[in-house]
Image (cartoon, helix red, strand yellow):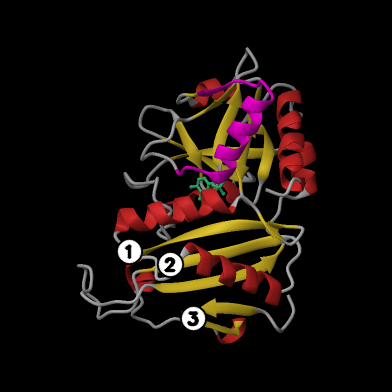
């Protein structure tokens, strides 16, 4: 990355290498904050409305006030993307409760802290899209509010590291009933014997992925049925196809779960069709 990377920190555009927040920022001390990652495709920010909706919901659930309007935030995000000259990449936005003397209850007066960075890359690797990836199942050890996009990501970090050490691309987290919740940074899907897409329903057990939401709409518009219900590890291992969705992996086929190869070990026709639909969606300005 070029030396002139720029970050936005609390109202100022600063050189990335010199950008910092105070040691008593509650994001740093308590993970008391939320974030969003948005894709930049051909200089355009992708699916901003659902990202803003989710950001505002996460903040509301934690009773953190967004210190700027959606319109002002939009200006900042575009400015960071422009200043960093990113054509294809990601923009990261974090809002924490701000700086206060360390004490668990909400501080009386703290200004929420806003940080925005942008970088090139963070897009699906072509080989993964063509050949598919392996996932590894791990116990879901997270809290009961996985619907909030909190910066508290330690279980997700441990899950992804476990996947990496086992030669997998992603970890599929499994609840106490042997049902898959979601990946460490992706939503999980399978294709059943009738060709329906199956993904877990929205609840406090998973994050409402923007890519999940968009893909559901795209599938339904193409007469591909989406069934929202939990599915087990066993069902996934015997599924016709499997795949993951996220802002950074788009739609990526899954061809192995633990030691089981899915179908013939190649991305299936439904997943391939969904990849095409999602690519068309990216190419269509909102
Ligand atoms: N689940 C989790 C736990 C995630 O961190 C992410 C990535 N933000 C997703 C699902 C996918 O969400 P999105 O499609 O909005 O990137």
Find residue 172 and report its horizontal and vertical position in percent. 52, 39
Check disc 1 and report its element: helix, strand or loop.
loop
Instruction: Tell me where residue 80 appears, x and y as whole percent.
Output: 63, 73
Q: Is residue 219 magenta?
A: yes
Image-quadrant location for residue 74: bottom right
Please tell me which residue is depicted at 70% across the width and 83% down the height of the picture.
4
Sequence-earlier tag: 2 or 1: 1
Q: Residues within 10 Å of mark 1 (few under 14, many from 20)?
A: many
Residue identifier under label 3: 11
Going by the picture, which residue comes out furthest to the top?
Answer: 194
Question: Real-space Cα distance between discs 2 and 1?
Answer: 8 Å
Judge left or right: residue 107 versus residue 197.
Answer: left
Secondary structure at numbered mark 3: loop
Q: Which residue is mark 1?
A: 64
Give neighbour class at mark 2: few <14, some 14-19, many 20+ (Cα, 10 Å): many
* First-in-chain label (1 vs 3): 3
- Residue 193 marker: none
Q: Residues within 10 Å of mark 3 (few under 14, many from 20)?
A: few
Location of residue 115 with respect to 39 vertically, above or below: below
Residue occupying image coordinates x 60% and y 32% = 217
**Which numbered tag is attached to residue 95?**
2
Q: Are marks 2 and 1 in contact (CB under 8 Å)?
A: yes
Total marks in image: 3
- Beta carbon of the mark 1 residue lies under 8 A of ligand 1: no
Is residue 222 on the magenta stretch? yes
Magenta-highlighted residues: 207-227
Residue 155 visible, this angle: yes
The residue that appears at 49% across and 62% down in the rendered structure is 70
**Residue 261 can be seen in this image:** no
Asked whether mark 3 and ligand 1 are closer than 8 Å, the reply comes as: no
């Amino acid at each position: 990355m070029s030396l002139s990377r720029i970050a936005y920190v609390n109202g100022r555009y600063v050189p990335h290498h010199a950008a910092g927040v105070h040691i008593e920022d509650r994001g740093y001390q308590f993970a008391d904050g939320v974030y969003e990652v948005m894709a930049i495709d051909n200089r355009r920010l992708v699916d901003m409305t659902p990202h803003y909706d989710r950001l505002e919901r996460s903040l509301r659930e934690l009773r953190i006030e967004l210190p700027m309007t959606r319109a002002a935030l939009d200006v900042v995000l575009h400015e960071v993307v422009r200043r960093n000259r990113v054509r294809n990449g990601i923009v990261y936005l974090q809002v924490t409760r701000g700086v206060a003397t360390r004490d668990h209850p909400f501080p009386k007066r703290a200004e929420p802290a806003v940080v925005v960075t942008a970088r090139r890359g963070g897009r699906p690797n072509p080989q993964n899209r063509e050949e598919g990836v392996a996932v590894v199942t791990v116990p879901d050890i997270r809290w009961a509010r996985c619907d909030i996009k909190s910066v508290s990501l330690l279980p997700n970090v441990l899950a992804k590291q476990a996947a990496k050490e086992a030669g997998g691309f992603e970890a599929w987290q499994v609840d106490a009933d042997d049902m898959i919740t979601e990946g460490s940074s992706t939503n999980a899907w399978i294709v059943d014997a009738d060709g329906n897409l199956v993904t877990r329903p929205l609840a406090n057990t998973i994050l409402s992925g923007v890519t999940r939401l968009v893909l559901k709409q795209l599938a339904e518009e193409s007469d591909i049925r989406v069934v929202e219900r939990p599915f087990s590890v066993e069902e996934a291992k015997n599924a016709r196809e499997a795949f993951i969705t996220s802002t950074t992996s788009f739609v990526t086929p899954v061809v192995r779960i633990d030691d089981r190869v899915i179908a013939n070990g190649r991305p299936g026709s439904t997943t391939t069709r969904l990849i095409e639909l999602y690519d068309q969606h990216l190419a269509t300005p909102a």
